[in-house]
Amino acid sequence: EAARLAEEYGLGRGGRYELPGSVLDLLEGEANAPAANDDDEDGDDERGRTLHPAFTDVRPGGGGSPLSVTALAGNNAAAVEACAAEAERLGYSPVVLGTTVEGEASVVAGVYASMAERLCQIRDGGGGGGDDAS
């Protein structure tokens, strides 16, 4: 189910918010393996393949609560969109500058500050120096 959710939310290979390859490899292995709760306490499936412990609901030695639970709470874009909607509800005029920027925080912060400053200049009547070609 985790692999299906990753695809659905653009987290799969080639998706807009692609997860790291190691995570996708693990999810794809889980998706292709039989159910881990097949009453086989040795951690192997019926073909003798070892199941990854993250995908079994049987604790070593048996009993107890499930070893893991898969839950997808959201992603960066969903969080930003929700924040923008709440800001608008509160009377602000939010502008989402992006959700996929990567890099050193101090550099990215400078880029965002420049973009916000330019948007304020445009809102307040344009001009204010800068490159008019942008």
Image (cartoon, rainbow, N blue to C red):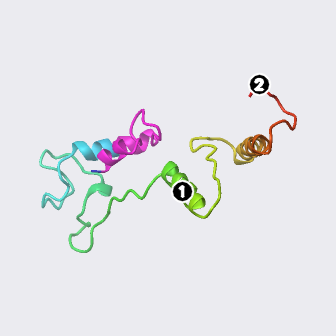
- Camera-nearest residue between 83 and 2: 83
In the displayed image of the protein, which residue is found farthest to the top? 133
Residue 98's quadrant in the figure?
Answer: top right
Q: Residues within 10 Å of mark 2 (few under 14, many from 20)?
A: few
Task: Identify the residue position indicated by label 2 in the image.
Answer: 133
- Camera-nearest residue between 126 and 50: 126
Instruction: Say whether disc 2 or disc 1 marks the residue closer to the N-terminus.
Output: 1
Instruction: Confirm whether the magenta stretch covers residue 24.
Output: yes
Instruction: Please tell me whether residue 57 is drawn above or below residue 77 in the rendered image.
Output: below
In the displayed image of the protein, which residue is found farthest to the right? 129
- Camera-nearest residue between 79 and 96: 96
Residue at point 14% right, 59% down?
A: 40
Residue at point 80% right, 41% down?
A: 125
Residue 131's quadrant in the figure?
Answer: top right
Left/right of residue 110 with respect to residue 12 in the rendered view: right
Q: Which mark is residue 7?
A: none
In the displayed image of the protein, which residue is found farthest to the bottom? 64
- Camera-nearest residue between 123 and 47: 123
Give coordinates of residue 18: x percent, y percent.
45, 39
Name which residue type carries label 1. Answer: Ala
Name which residue type carries label 2. Answer: Ala
Instruction: Confirm whether the magenta stretch covers residue 5.
Output: yes
Residue 7's quadrant in the figure?
Answer: top left
Residues rendered magenta in the picture: 2-26
Q: Which mark is residue 85?
A: 1
Give coordinates of residue 123: x percent, y percent.
75, 44
